[in-house]
């Protein structure tokens, strides 16, 4: 009972105290609020100014502040609807009311001290012991204020008024059992761009608790959901969808942070107005682990999955984040790139450039695998020039398999297929290895390449090498197109290529994104064994049976290259070097063995100018002339055992039995002894004394030569022949034991000649025996108009065959011994006889003027019975014998004049003057015929001749006539005897003056 009384007494005392306290508190509410707020200001430096306040009693003292202002450093940092504080009575009595048992803020509006535009520039807190110390100070300060803090429906804004989050709820508390461990929970909605509408919540433990891990200061977990992706756009393409994720972390005593994150996105869509419809990218998830310390921010694990398939894995770290030069390092593991899907996605994009669409349609994507990739660079470099930083610091490997593409049809190349290679990129150095591909039936393998892209593509150094097994038949259309493109001469002669060629090629140079430049250095080594070339018009294909060809920018080298042709083969060795001064050849050796010459020479020389048939053998070594850049020095000998050689100035080829072409010390000599020209033996030699100053010297000795075998030789009155193209000076000497020009026969013919490149020519020192006599001739031809100048003479020639050359006459009208001198000009292009000009002197001795139309008609007018005797035959039957015929002709335009024609003979003398028109074959002459005794009388009585001779004399018997009209049918008119004085004076004046000078004036 005693205990009961004691308990009752204590309860009474407590009740009295409580009542008294309540009465005291009720009477001093304002002073209590001021007291509590003063304690808060003293502990935190924050002023809290309520619009109204109230105090309520309960298990704790409840202080309610309506619409309080929270001011720090003179700026309002929080607006609240109300602030409710639960104060322990005990703390009021012994600790100035603090720490509060609970502090609850309702609908606070929290204003951050930065504007929304400056949020990204707010520095992250530095991990480290100092950060933990600062955080502990915050917790201690909070511990002095309250045991628990609640925030209900808070709003967070930037200093410029832009909302960051709303509906934020926060609870932070500690317990008396673990007073150093704060438990924090929060949730809210994010309003700020680019993740407006995202939800976030978290649970964190701060401080040291009974179950804390060694060295751990804090741990927690965050959750996000409904995080939108609508704001992520680039080049008009954007992602649509939402992400949800979580984060677990541990904050250690040294300030380091470790943890991991998980995020997922479902039904990601790629949207753009350039797409016909959104592209469903599928479902993705991302898992990461991180480790943050004072000297390093590291994401130690990154795994990106599409559904359950790993797409990408890697890690990243930022070294020295608080230093002046932080460095970012990224490592990504291997992944497969769906090139086919990427191609289809690109093709679905509207308004792509036409050339890009064409390129995509020509590509077969194949399989693309990206291996490990590492990027390590200064963070400032990545921020200011990301592409340059990636180019200079990225290290990545990869492979492509079975990629293909169709080459534009105008190249006529087959499509490329099965392109595979190992790719590598290391800090600007791009490498390609183990490259293989097929283009049609050709194969490419062992492709190796590298390029230094550290400073960009333009001007980047590169090197490459590759082996190629080429199918020439399939590549021939492309090769033929290249020959057409570069307009190579005689390209149409290459009809076909076949066989295969093994090539090893290497190249180096500088890349250009603007132009396709040839490599500075390259080398191609080809083993064309089995390659077959078919040349138009050749007797058979040309096949490469052995040897190699090496090509580089400075030279082309042939090593034991053997070319097999029908009936023979050729070998080629040596080098062709390319220098600034031109092409330089070093020991370029061509060896021929029974090599068919017809087609192969035609590739070098126009067959219409020069052609050779038959097998050629021998060897020629060609070197450049060091004293004359660009000039060549061939040395050697080629032999044509049996065949033909055709020059453009000969109508028939020379058939040879052993022609030799010798080249030595700038001299070329083609010798063809024992040959035949139109079945006549001939020794023929052509010499080029110095091929650096080309000129040709021809020497020929022939058994019988038809001069018209030379295409430029013809009768002057014959139709003109086509011009002959001969671009170098030419000279020579020809001898023929017998020869002919049409029907004109000669023996012991010799002549020299020259011809200029312009076509002017000169035949001189020409001599021959023709029709018993000797002849000499000098001919000069003028190219532009084909005028010729003829000078020459004939001595003691039988004229009879000359009158029968045309084939119309079977009997010559003139017999005797002809002496002739000429100096004539004429045009051989138009009408030779109508343009003939110059002079001729004719003498015929001891002959007979035989019967012909003109003579027969003249004799028909004369009674010659008294002239005849037993010693004198009848001229009407046997013609008129003569001792001499002497005359000179001068003329132009085909019209020639004579005033001194004299025939002297035993029967009569004949004189004439007048003209002959050679073009029209017409004449107009005065002809006098004198019996022998009349002439004798005149000559013996010279002083009596004068103007009175017309009075007549019984001793003077003569007939004279006017002859005109065509030579073949002349008109003859007898002339009156009264004019005989003048006639005799004119017609006999010349021979009389010759016999007795100055007789007739």
Image (cartoon, rainbow, N blue to C red):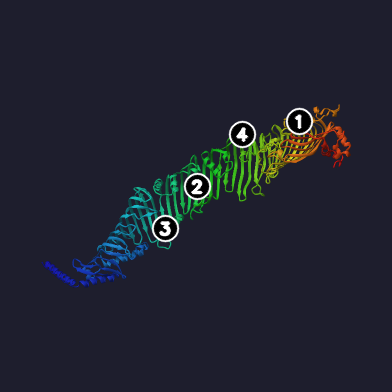
Q: Nearer the viewer, residue 410 or 538?
A: 410
Q: Earlier in the sequence, mark 2 or mark 3?
A: 3
Q: Nearer the viewer, mark 1 or mark 3?
A: 1
Task: List x then y, in percent, for residue 31.
Answer: 22, 73
Question: Which quadrant of the rendered structure holds the N terminus?
Answer: bottom left
Mark pair 3, 4: CA separation: 74 Å
Report the side of 672 relative to 54 (left or right). right
SS for callout 2: strand
Q: Earlier in the sequence, mark 3 or mark 4?
A: 3
What residue did someone put label 3 on? 328
Q: Nearer the viewer, mark 4 or mark 2?
A: 4
Report the side of 170 relative to 862 (left or right). left
What residue did someone put label 4 on? 567
Q: Nearer the viewer, residue 255 or 607?
A: 607
Task: List x then y, in percent, for residue 811.
Answer: 76, 29
Q: Earlier in the sequence, mark 4 or mark 2?
A: 2
What residue did someone put label 1 on? 853
Q: Nearer the viewer, residue 146 or 505?
A: 505
Mark pair 4, 2: CA separation: 43 Å
SS for callout 1: helix
Q: Earlier in the sequence, mark 4 or mark 1?
A: 4
What residue did someone put label 2 on? 448
Q: Earlier in the sequence, mark 1 or mark 3?
A: 3
Mark pair 4, 1: CA separation: 67 Å
**Residue 131 shows up from this direction:** yes
In contact (CB < 8 Å): disc 2 and disc 3: no
């Amino acid at each position: 009972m005693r205990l009961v009384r004691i308990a009752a007494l204590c309860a009474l005392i407590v009740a009295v105290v409580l009542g008294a306290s309540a009465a005291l508190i009720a009477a001093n509410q304002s002073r209590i609020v001021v007291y509590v707020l003063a304690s808060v200001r003293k502990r935190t430096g924050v002023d809290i100014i309520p619009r109204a306040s109230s105090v309520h009693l309960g298990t704790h003292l409840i202080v309610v502040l309506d619409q309080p202002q929270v001011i720090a450093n003179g700026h309002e940092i929080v607006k609240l609807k109300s602030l409710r504080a639960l104060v322990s009575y005990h703390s009021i009595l012994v600790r100035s009311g603090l720490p509060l048992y609970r502090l609850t803020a309702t609908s606070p509006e929290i204003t951050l001290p930065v504007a929304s535009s400056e949020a990204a520039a707010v520095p992250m807190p530095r991990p480290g012991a100092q950060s933990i110390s600062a955080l502990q100070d915050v917790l201690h300060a909070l511990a002095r204020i309250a045991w628990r803090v609640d925030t209900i429906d808070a709003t967070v804004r930037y200093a410029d008024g832009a909302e960051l989050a709303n509906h934020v709820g926060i609870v932070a508390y500690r317990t008396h059992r673990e007073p150093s461990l704060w438990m924090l929970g929060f949730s809210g909605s994010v309003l700020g761009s680019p993740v407006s509408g995202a939800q976030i919540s978290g649970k964190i433990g701060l401080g040291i608790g009974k179950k804390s891990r060694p060295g751990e200061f804090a741990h927690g977990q965050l959750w996000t959901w409904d995080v939108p992706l609508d704001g992520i756009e680039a080049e008009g393409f954007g992602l649509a969808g939402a992400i949800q994720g979580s984060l677990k972390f541990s904050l250690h005593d040294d300030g380091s942070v470790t943890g991991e994150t998980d995020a997922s996105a479902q039904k990601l869509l790629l949207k753009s107005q350039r797409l016909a419809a959104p592209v469903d990218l599928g479902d993705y998830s991302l898992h990461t682990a991180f480790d943050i310390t004072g000297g390093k921010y590291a994401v130690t694990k990154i795994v990106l999955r599409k559904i359950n398939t790993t797409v990408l894995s890697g890690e990243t770290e930022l070294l020295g984040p608080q230093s002046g030069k932080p460095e970012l390092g990224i490592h990504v593991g291997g992944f497969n790139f769906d090139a086919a899907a990427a191609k289809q996605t690109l093709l679905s994009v509207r308004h792509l450039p036409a050339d890009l669409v064409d390129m995509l349609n020509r590509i077969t994507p194949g399989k693309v695998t990206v291996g490990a990739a590492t990027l390590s660079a200064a963070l400032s470099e990545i921020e200011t020039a990301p592409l340059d930083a990636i180019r200079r610091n990225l290290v990545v490997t990869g492979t492509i398999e079975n990629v293909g593409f169709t080459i534009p049809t105008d190249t006529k190349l087959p499509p490329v297929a099965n392109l595979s290679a190992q790719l590598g990129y290391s800090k600007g150095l791009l490498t390609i290895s183990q490259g293989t591909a097929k283009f049609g039936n050709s194969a490419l393998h062992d492709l190796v390449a590298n390029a230094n892209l550290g400073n960009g593509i333009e001007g980047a150094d590169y090197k490459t090498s590759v082996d190629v097994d080429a199918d020439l038949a399939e590549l021939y259309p492309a090769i033929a197109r290249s020959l057409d493109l570069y307009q190579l001469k005689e390209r149409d002669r290459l009809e076909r290529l076949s066989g295969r060629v093994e090539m090893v090629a290497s190249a180096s140079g500088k890349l250009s994104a603007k132009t396709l430049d040839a490599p500075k250095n390259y080398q191609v080594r080809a083993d064309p064994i089995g390659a077959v070339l078919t040349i138009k018009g050749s007797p058979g294909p040309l096949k490469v049976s052995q040897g190699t060809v090496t090509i580089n920018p400075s030279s082309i080298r042939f090593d034991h290259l053997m070319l097999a042709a029908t009936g023979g083969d050729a070998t080629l060795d040596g080098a062709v070097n390319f220098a600034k001064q031109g092409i330089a050849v070093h020991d370029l050796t061509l060896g021929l063995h029974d090599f068919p010459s017809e087609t192969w020479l035609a590739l070098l020389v126009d067959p219409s100018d020069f052609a050779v048939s038959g097998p050629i053998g021998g060897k020629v070594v060609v070197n450049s002339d060091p004293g004359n850049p660009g000039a060549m020095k061939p040395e050697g000998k080629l032999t044509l055992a049996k065949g033909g050689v055709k020059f453009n100035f000969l109508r028939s080829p020379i058939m040879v039995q052993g022609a030799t072409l010798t080249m030595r010390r700038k001299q070329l000599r083609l010798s063809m002894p024992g040959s035949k020209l139109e079945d006549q033996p001939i020794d023929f030699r052509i010499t080029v004394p110095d091929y650096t100053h080309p000129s040709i010297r021809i020497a020929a000795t022939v058994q019988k030569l038809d001069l018209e075998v030379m295409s430029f030789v013809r009768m002057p009155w014959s139709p003109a022949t086509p011009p002959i193209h001969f671009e170098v000076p030419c000279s020579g000497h020809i001898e023929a034991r017998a020869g002919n020009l049409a029907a004109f026969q000669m023996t012991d013919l010799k002549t020299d000649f020259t011809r200029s490149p312009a076509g002017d020519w000169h035949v001189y020192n020409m001599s021959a025996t023709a029709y018993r006599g000797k002849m000499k001739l000098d001919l000069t031809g003028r190219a532009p108009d084909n005028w010729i100048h003829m000078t020459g003479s004939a001595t003691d020639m039988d004229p009879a065959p000359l009158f029968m050359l045309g084939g119309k006459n079977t009997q010559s009208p003139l017999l005797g011994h002809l002496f002739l001198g000429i100096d004539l000009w004429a045009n051989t292009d138009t009408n030779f006889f109508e343009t003939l000009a110059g002079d001729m002197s004719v003498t015929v001795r001891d002959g007979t003027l035989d019967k012909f139309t003109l003579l027969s008609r003249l004799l028909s007018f004369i009674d010659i019975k008294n002239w005849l005797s037993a010693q004198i035959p009848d001229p009407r039957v046997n013609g008129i014998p003569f001792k001499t015929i002497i005359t000179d002709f001068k003329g132009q335009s085909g019209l020639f004049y004579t005033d001194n024609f004299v025939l002297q003979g035993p029967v009569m003398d004949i004189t004439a003057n007048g003209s002959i028109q050679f073009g029209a074959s017409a004449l107009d002459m005065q002809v006098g015929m004198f019996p022998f005794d009349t002439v004798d009388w005149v000559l013996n009585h010279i002083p009596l001749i004068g103007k009175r001779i017309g009075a007549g004399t019984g001793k003077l018997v003569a007939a004279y006539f006017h002859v005109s009209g065509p030579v073949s049918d002349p008109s003859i008119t007898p002339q009156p005897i009264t004019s005989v004085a003048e006639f005799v004076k004119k017609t006999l004046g010349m021979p009389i003056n010759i016999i007795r000078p100055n007789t007739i004036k």
